[in-house]
């Protein structure tokens, strides 16, 4: 199983000695990790362990928080994303993000998808844009449910559909990496299952990192799991190994509910 | 081992381990008394052993039900998961050990001319070894001790050696005196049953090792 998952490609993203500070407080402490397109990587850990903060440093979302400061190096295809002159808007198109609460634009379903490709100049005309909208919605498993109501408002969809709409929106700009921060925690089990199935289908096409508080979800959707505690990366390994025979006592205590 | 935040989970695990310990105690007793009955021609004791085997079946179903419930409701991970999987498998194996002992007890009235059979004393010694393996593997289970589990596994070779020796002995009895064939054949089955009990104790030891450290003892030797 290990060999099957061992990627023979270069990592898509590479973090080296990354620390993130909020003012004087060190939220992430010198973390290094490789992220590959071949599999889904789950970040788990108790609240305040730094996993979401670390996730946000992969597309410089922390830049929007004034007091946040990132040290170390994060590369996308070998290029330092924190180097000066980096186009952050372009970066966030290549490294998309899906949040805990679905946040569709208060516009039509069609416009939610078309907006990104249009401003990034991905489409030459209406026909091409239509094609992108359909392809993105299909990949997000939403097309059949919304194809007859593309002009309806995105906010009129159910929570699960809204979240898949947000994933479709992220996909529409042809990202290479998708960051997901608790993408299913506000959804019912059926909608959650659809998101998880979708994540599995997207695997291999995009490098996916998912932050989740649900151990079972991490076990179900990921092939690699990283356990964070107090800003440290405690253990990183094959998901089945982490959940059956963790090497570190702290990992074991956390995933078996003995933590604290 | 640190306690779970959810206390009821610890109670479930303690109860599950208690059931396994109870099964182990019954199986060990069944081996000893089954052999006592056989060696002494004590039919009443033999019947008791047969009757008591039902209790093992009941306990095995209890372990099954409890393990399935814990898997469904607690979604256990890591050592908790291994603990429950091991309990599930160990219960099945101990139930089999009980069946073999019952099988021995059933043969009490099928042996003629006990005094002539020197293999009977060999069977007694072999049975003690097998019962000791069962006893010690359950101690290892209770202590979550992988080293002790490995020691039990190593002892299986002795039981196998007894089997070979008893086999040869019984065959020579049969060759020399065909009138003993019927009884000797019965004892051959008994020896075979004891040999299987040793194998099953070895299986339990492997599960104890797995539950404790997450790998099988053979993984290390390979």
Image (cartoon, coloured by chain):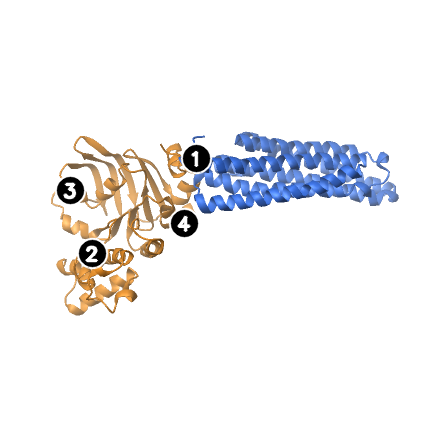
Q: Is residue B121 above or below residue A165?
A: above
Between circles 3 and 2, the one closer to the viewer is 2
Q: Chain of mark 1?
A: B
Q: Is residue A47 left or right of B69 when viewed as pictured?
A: left
How far from the left and from the top, in percent, is residue B113?
A: 86, 38
Spatial separation of the CA atoms under disc 1 and disc 3 = 43 Å
Discs 2 and 1 lie in a common subunit: no
Question: In the rendered image, which residue does mark 3 sit on?
Answer: A63
Spatial separation of the CA atoms under disc 2 and disc 4 = 37 Å
Q: Is residue B168 left or right of B177 when viewed as pictured?
A: left
What's the mark number on residue A104?
Answer: 2
Spatial separation of the CA atoms under disc 3 and disc 2 = 22 Å
| Secondary structure state at the residue bearing disc 2 | loop
Between circles 2 and 4, the one closer to the viewer is 2
Question: In the rendered image, which residue does mark 4 sit on?
Answer: A4
Between circles 4 and 3, the one closer to the viewer is 3
């Amino acid at each position: 199983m290990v060999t099957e998952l061992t990627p023979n490609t270069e990592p898509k993203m590479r973090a080296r000695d990354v620390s993130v500070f909020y003012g004087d407080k060190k939220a992430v402490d010198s973390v290094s990790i490789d992220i590959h397109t071949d599999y889904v990587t789950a970040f788990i850990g108790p609240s305040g362990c730094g996993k979401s903060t670390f996730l946000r440093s992969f597309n410089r979302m922390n830049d929007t928080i004034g007091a946040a400061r990132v040290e170390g190096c994060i590369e996308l295809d070998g290029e330092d994303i924190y180097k000066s002159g980096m186009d952050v808007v372009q970066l966030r198109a290549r490294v998309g993000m899906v949040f805990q609460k679905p946040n569709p634009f208060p516009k039509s379903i069609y416009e939610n998808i078309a907006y990104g490709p249009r401003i990034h100049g991905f489409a030459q005309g209406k026909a091409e844009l239509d094609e992108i909208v359909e392809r993105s919605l299909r990949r997000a498993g939403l097309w059949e449910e919304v194809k007859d109501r593309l002009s309806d408002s995105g906010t009129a969809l159910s929570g699960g559909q809204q979240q898949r709409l947000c994933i479709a929106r992220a996909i529409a700009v042809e990202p290479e990496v998708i960051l997901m921060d608790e993408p299913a925690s506000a959804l019912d089990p059926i909608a959650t299952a659809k998101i998880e199935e979708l994540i599995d289908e997207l695997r291999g096409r995009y490098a996916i990192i998912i932050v989740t508080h649900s151990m079972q979800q991490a076990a179900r959707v990921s092939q690699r799991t990283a356990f964070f505690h107090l800003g440290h990366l405690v253990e990183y390994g094959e998901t089945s190994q982490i959940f059956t025979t963790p090497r570190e006592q702290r990992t074991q205590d956390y995933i078996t509910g003995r933590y604290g | 081992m640190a306690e779970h935040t959810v206390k009821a989970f610890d109670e479930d695990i303690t109860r599950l381990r208690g059931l396994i310990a109870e099964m182990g105690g019954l199986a060990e007793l069944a081996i000893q008394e089954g052999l006592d009955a056989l060696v002494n021609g004590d039919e009443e004791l033999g019947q008791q052993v047969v009757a008591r085997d039902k209790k093992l079946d009941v306990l095995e179903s209890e372990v099954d039900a409890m393990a399935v419930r814990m898997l469904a409701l607690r979604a256990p991970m890591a050592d908790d998961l291994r603990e429950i999987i091991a309990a599930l498998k160990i219960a099945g194996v101990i139930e089999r050990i009980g069946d073999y002992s019952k099988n021995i007890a059933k043969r009490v009235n099928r042996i003629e001319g006990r005094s002539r059979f020197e293999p009977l004393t060999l069977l007694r010694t072999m049975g003690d070894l097998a019962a000791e393996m069962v006893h010690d593997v359950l101690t290892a289970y209770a202590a979550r001790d992988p080293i002790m589990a490995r020691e039990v596994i190593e002892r299986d070779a002795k039981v196998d050696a007894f089997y070979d020796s008893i086999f040869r002995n019984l065959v020579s009895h049969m060759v020399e005196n065909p009138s003993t064939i019927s009884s000797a054949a019965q004892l051959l089955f008994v020896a075979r049953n004891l040999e299987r009990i040793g194998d099953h104790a070895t299986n339990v030891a492997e599960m104890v090792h797995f539950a404790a450290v997450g790998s099988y003892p053979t993984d290390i030797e390979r």
